Image (spheres, rainbow, N blue to C red):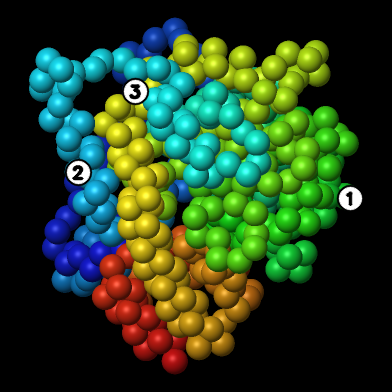
Amino acid sequence: MSSCICIPHAILLPSKTNWNSSKSNNGRRQGHCTDVPRNVNMENLQSGYLFPEIFRRESEHIVKYPDASLIRLGIGDTTEPIPDIITSAMAEHAFALSTVKGYKGYGEEQGNMALRKAITENFYKDVGLKSNEIFISDGAQCEISRLQMLLGSNMTVAVQDPSFPAYIDSSVIVGQAGKFQPETDKYKNIVYMNCTPENGFFPDLSTTSRTNIIFFCSPNNPTGHAASWQQLKQLVEFAKANGSIIIYDSAYAAYISDASPRSIYEIPGAREVAIEISSFSKFAGFTGVRLGWTVVPEELVYSNGYPVIKDFDRIVCTCFNGASNIAQAGGLACLSPDGYQALNSVVGYYKENAKIIVDTFESLGLKVYGGKNAPYAWVHFPGKISWNTFAEILEKTHIVTIPGSGFGPGGEEYIRVSAFGHRECILEASRRLKNFYT
């Protein structure tokens, strides 16, 4: 499913398994049980992951309004076709697998060296990285969990608030988070770095506790804020002073329109304190193809002097057989001169969508952030509970958004609106929102 498509609700989605039919009142299944206890960390997770919950509510809405047309501006899934030059390369590679000459099985777990070199040349040419420091992945979200496995359960963690929920959920799953505290809507052992308009969406590091790991996303999902060079310099210096490692998520770097850094490694000293994860998903439309990369510099070492890259290489070789060869062929085509030019046109299309969305909400007198350096608009509804705003917009306009509190307690009173969508859907959403709020 695309994230913004006008769809008649009569096209119903597959129903989900009704676990409640086989559960007792305490939420546990009746009948035979094994003697295997449930992972206590899984028990510590709060409700479901954000995006499946959005899908569930969307499905309920479809049943309730079967004749309406739904516009999906929620989950950040790309909608525009991948340029032919890229899909042709993947198709050629796939067809070659049916020939003796073209068949190839397992590749290197770290990724095709030609692709690793192309990523180095295209994105890190001026910051001194080497291709052996690039690891090809099946996407940034999967890599977050592999990095958590690398670092282990004894780490302390800091996250931006609001931030992409996988940082927190993966921290809970590996046992870093401590107990959930309902009164604050936070986990006890996670440091939430408040990022609001009042502080320029950058945390006050002078009051931030020291942690082993700092998750930092720029441009940020969901706020759309791209950290400045000076802000990232502060972050690197903070990490170095505290002996911390930054896990820097640059998945939306292609959307940066100003002088904001596209990589943490543009900052002096970052190679000694930072791992960078990135993805082809949002700039190349590879949300379904699945391809990304991780940078682990040779200078990054543990407290005992052992290189982190050696342990990460072991994790990759143990837990991952490498990204699809077909997907990697597509990645190489993305980074060819013609492929990259074609992708920039698609990114420009989404940026235009973002401008339409921002202009729409601003015309309604609402304060809007983001939309310039990221494909998301972060819209403030003062005094309102974000899930209520989400429900109201869905009920009255048949538009799916994302409630800000799904990204952490700092997202309350906000909704995130995605610019991924066909232009006619974006314009129709604009019309519906203006009709409803005026």
Relative depth, front residue between 348 and 367: 348
Q: Position of residue 21 (x, y in %)?
A: 28, 35
Name the kind of residue labelled 3 in the image: Gln
Kind of residue sitting beneath label 2? Ser
Residue 269 shown left or right of residue 338 in the figure:
right
Residue shown at 49%/55% (left/top)?
254
Q: CA distance from mark 2 to mark 1?
A: 51 Å
Q: Could you classify mark 1 by the number of other residues whose Cα lies within 10 Å: few (under 14), some (14-19), or many (20 or more)?
A: few
Q: Residue at x 25, y 15 (%)?
A: 105
What secondary structure is found at the residue carrying circle 2?
A: helix
Residue placed under numbered mark 3 in the picture: 30
Res. 81 in view: yes
Corner quadrant of residue 211 = top right
Q: Whole-Å distance between the Cαs marked 2 and 3?
A: 52 Å
Q: Is residue 215 visible?
A: no
Counting residues from the start of the chain, the first of labels 2 and 1 encountered is: 2
Identify the secondary structure beneath mark 1: helix
Q: Is residue 404 left or right of residue 338?
A: right
* Residue bearing mark 2: 88
Rendered view: 222 above or below 157: below
Give the residue at x 16% y 71%.
67
The CA distance from mark 3 to mark 1 is 52 Å
Tell us which disc is closer to us: 3 or 1. Answer: 1
